[in-house]
Image (tube, rainbow, N blue to C red):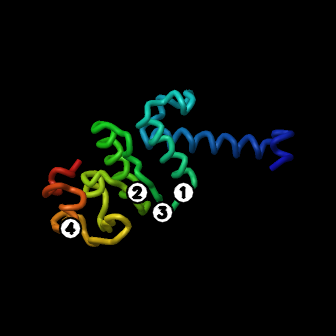
Amino acid sequence: GVFGAIFRDRRTLVEEAAIEKRSYELLEYVGVANHANSLAKHLAYGDQRRLEIARALATEPKLLALDEPAAGMNATETQGLKRLLQEIRRDGTTILLIEHDMKLVMGVCDRVLVLDYGKKIAEGSAATVQSDPKVIAAYLGGEISLDAAAP
């Protein structure tokens, strides 16, 4: 509170230490702890995205909503993102992923809903959706296998 901020009593110091500790844990978790003392604007694009995920995770969400998290990432960054999202899922957080990178979607999601110009064209498991002719025509340009999407 205001009192703690002005007078920095013991309780405030303990709270601040706990927050700082949790912050470093989250930076480590998402893979950017080596940049803990850097300004976000100086981070590589992929690291900036990971930092944003850490910020979201700091709220301890049950549902993590991500809108195009792989946009602008190169293949290596996208693979790292996929591993991170898989780890977040394993740790019990549900992920709502809005993404055009179908390999990422197929490698992370249990259930997939596919929209084409705002209209639902398919819904189901990754295996079901990947073989749907409407999805193939709209997004994939050919068949994609789950093996190709595996980590």
Residue 135's x, y, as percent? 22, 64
* Residue mark closest to the camera, 3 vs 4: 4
* Residue mark closest to the camera, 3 vs 2: 3
> Secondary structure beneath disc 3?
strand
N-term-proximal mark, 1 vs 4: 1
Q: In the image, is residue 141 above or below residue 70?
A: below
Residue position for label 1: 60
Cα distance between the residues tagged 3 and 2? 12 Å
Number of residues whose C-alpha sits closer than 10 Å to that of mark 4, classed few (under 14), some (14–19) or many (20 or more): some
Residue position for label 3: 63
Q: Which mark is residue 31?
A: none
Q: Amino acid at mark 2?
A: Asp
Q: Which mark is residue 134?
A: 4
Residue 114 or residue 20, whichever sits in front: 114
Residue 29's x, y, as percent? 44, 43
Task: Look at 16% across and 67% down and name the residue there.
Answer: 133
Q: Quadrant of residue 92?
A: bottom left
Cα distance between the residues tagged 1 and 4? 37 Å
Cα distance between the residues tagged 2 and 4? 33 Å
Residue position for label 2: 91
Residue 87 or residue 50, whichever sits in front: 50
Q: Amino acid at mark 3?
A: Leu
